[in-house]
C-alpha cells in the first residue's frame, strides 16, 4: 500500500501541467474556466489545423493526423495498462 492517494497524484500532475508556460494556461482555462471554454478550444484546434492546410498544403493536413494517430495509440496503451 502506498502513502499517496489517487487524488494527490492527480493534483500533482495538474500542478506540473499548469506550470508549462503556454499549455498550462490553456489547460487551466479549460478545467477551471467557463463551461463554453472547451468548445472554444476545439474550435481553435480545428481552425489551426485548417490554417496549416492552407499554408502548407497537403502536408499540413497529413502530419497533424499522423501525430493524432500516435497520441491515440499511446492513449489506448495507457488505458489498457490501467
Image (cartoon, rainbow, N blue to C red):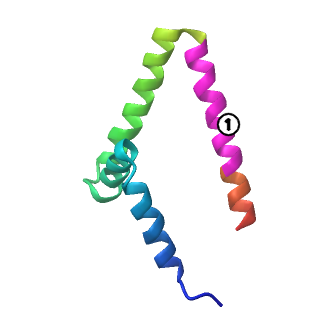
Dominant SS of magenta comes to helix
Q: How many marks?
A: 1
User: Can you say which quadrant of the picture contains the N terminus?
Assistant: bottom right
Work out which residue is located at the far left of the displayed protein and give it: 34
Q: Does 75 lie within the magenta span?
A: no
Q: Position of residue 14 (x, y in %)?
A: 43, 63
Whether residue 65 appears in magenta in the rendering, the answer is: yes
Tell me the residue at 68%/39% (across/down): 70
Q: Which residue is mark 1?
A: 69
Is 76 left or right of 8, judged from the image as shown? Answer: right
Image quarter of the C terminus? bottom right
Q: Secondary structure at mark 1?
A: helix
Q: Position of residue 52 (x, y in %)?
A: 48, 17
| Residue 17 image point, x, y percent | 43, 56
Which residue is located at x 68 percent, y 60 percent?
A: 79
User: Looking at this view, is 36 or 29 the one in front?
Assistant: 29
User: Would you place residue 50 above or below residue 13 in this image?
Assistant: above
Local crowd at mark 1 within 10 Å, few (<14), some, or many (≥20)? few
Residue 64: percent from left, percent from top = 58, 27
Q: Which residues are magenta?
A: 59-74
41 over 82 or under it: above or below: above
Amino acid at each position: 500500500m502506498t502513502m499517496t492517494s489517487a487524488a494527490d497524484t492527480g493534483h500533482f500532475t495538474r500542478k506540473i501541467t499548469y506550470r508549462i508556460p503556454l499549455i498550462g494556461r490553456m489547460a487551466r482555462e479549460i478545467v477551471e474556466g467557463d463551461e463554453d471554454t472547451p468548445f472554444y478550444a476545439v474550435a481553435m484546434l480545428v481552425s489551426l489545423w485548417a490554417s496549416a492546410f492552407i499554408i502548407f498544403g497537403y502536408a499540413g493536413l497529413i502530419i497533424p493526423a499522423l501525430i493524432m494517430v500516435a497520441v491515440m495509440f499511446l492513449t489506448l496503451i495507457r488505458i489498457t495498462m490501467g
